[in-house]
Image (cartoon, grey):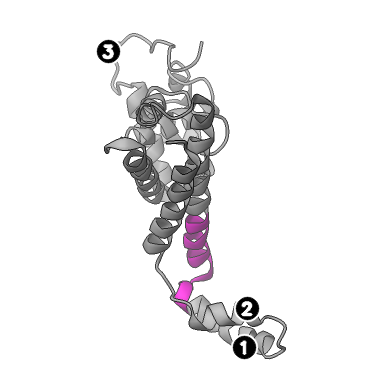
């Protein structure tokens, strides 16, 4: 039986009451502070001041705990809007914001579909907005938006982690790399790259995300028969 359907142990009088929700909230707090490396059943039990064996009545494995954590974050993603374009825009932006609040989410999404109740509710809202679209096109459309968002947030989170590891923000890193690029461009081997870096507008992450998402949705609109 999957964890979503498995009942919790009955309540009993103990000094530290437990619930699946409390365990998951604690795991998310640890992951938000120190990444997924800070999450294990033993570490969560220590944070709750209980023995690790007590957690096994609620959660059988670390993988179940991670699934529950992801589904708890999906509760923060409630797309809204009129029509498929507004709803897909909403789900893309909300998913990105959730990943920025919970960096570890970028490491856990993108594989097999999430089956928790909050993930299913998110999927239902998105698919309902695509009602009327050719049924064979629905999943490729959703997959394209998910791939764009997941790729973007993983790149953005990787940049954050690089800043922390190196002690340099993006501007400082660019300044440190500048002399090398000047020397490489002076060879004349990279004229297109030089032109873009020298002359193109340098957009921030939010602008880049919105523009790219707009291009994607324009393409989807052109591909959906009216």
The residue at the far front in this view is 226
Say which residue label 3 marks. 13
**Image point 27% across, 38% down: which residue?**
81
Can residue 33 be seen in the rendering of this structure? yes
Rendered image quadrant of residue 95: top left
Nearer the observer, 210 or 41: 210
Label pair 1/3, CB-CB below 8 angstroms = no
Decide whether the magenta segment is chiefly helix, strand or loop.
Answer: helix
Q: Which mark is residue 182?
A: 1
- CA gap, disc 3 to disc 2? 70 Å
Quarter of the image containing the C terminus?
Answer: top left
**Which numbered disc, 1 or 2, marks the residue that appears first in the sequence?**
1
Q: Nearer the viewer, residue 92 or 51?
A: 92
**Looking at the image, is mark 3 or mark 2 earlier in the sequence?**
3
Q: Position of residue 189 (x, y in %)?
A: 72, 83
Q: Secondary structure at mark 1?
A: helix
126 magenta-colored: no
- Mark 2 and mark 3 in contact (Cβ < 8 Å)? no
Q: Which residues are magenta?
A: 155-171
Q: Residue 82: x percent and y percent?
A: 27, 37
**Badge 3 element:** loop
Question: How many residues crowd mark 1 within 10 Å: few (<14), some (14–19), many (20+)?
Answer: few
């Amino acid at each position: 039986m999957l964890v979503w359907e498995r009942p919790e142990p009955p309540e009993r009088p103990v000094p530290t009451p437990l619930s699946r929700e409390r365990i998951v909230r604690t795991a998310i707090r640890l992951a938000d502070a120190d990444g997924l490396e800070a999450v294990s059943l033993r570490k969560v039990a220590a944070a709750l001041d209980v023995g690790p064996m007590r957690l096994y009545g609620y959660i059988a494995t670390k993988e179940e705990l991670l699934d529950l954590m992801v589904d708890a974050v999906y509760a923060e993603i409630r797309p809204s809007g009129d029509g498929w374009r507004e709803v897909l825009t909403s789900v893309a932006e909300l998913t990105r914001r959730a990943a920025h609040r919970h960096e570890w989410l970028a490491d856990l999404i993108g594989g097999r579909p999430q089956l928790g109740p909050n993930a299913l509710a998110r999927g239902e809202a998105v698919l309902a907005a695509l009602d009327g679209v050719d049924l064979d096109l629905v999943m490729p459309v959703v997959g394209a938006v998910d791939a764009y968002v997941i790729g973007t947030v993983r790149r953005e989170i990787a940049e954050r982690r690089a800043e922390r590891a190196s002690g340099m923000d993006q501007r400082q890193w660019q300044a440190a790399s500048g002399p090398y690029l000047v020397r490489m461009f002076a060879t004349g081997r990279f004229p297109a790259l030089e032109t873009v870096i020298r002359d193109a507008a340098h957009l921030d992450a939010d602008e880049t995300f919105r523009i790219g998402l707009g291009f994607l949705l324009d393409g989807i609109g052109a591909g959906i028969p009216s």
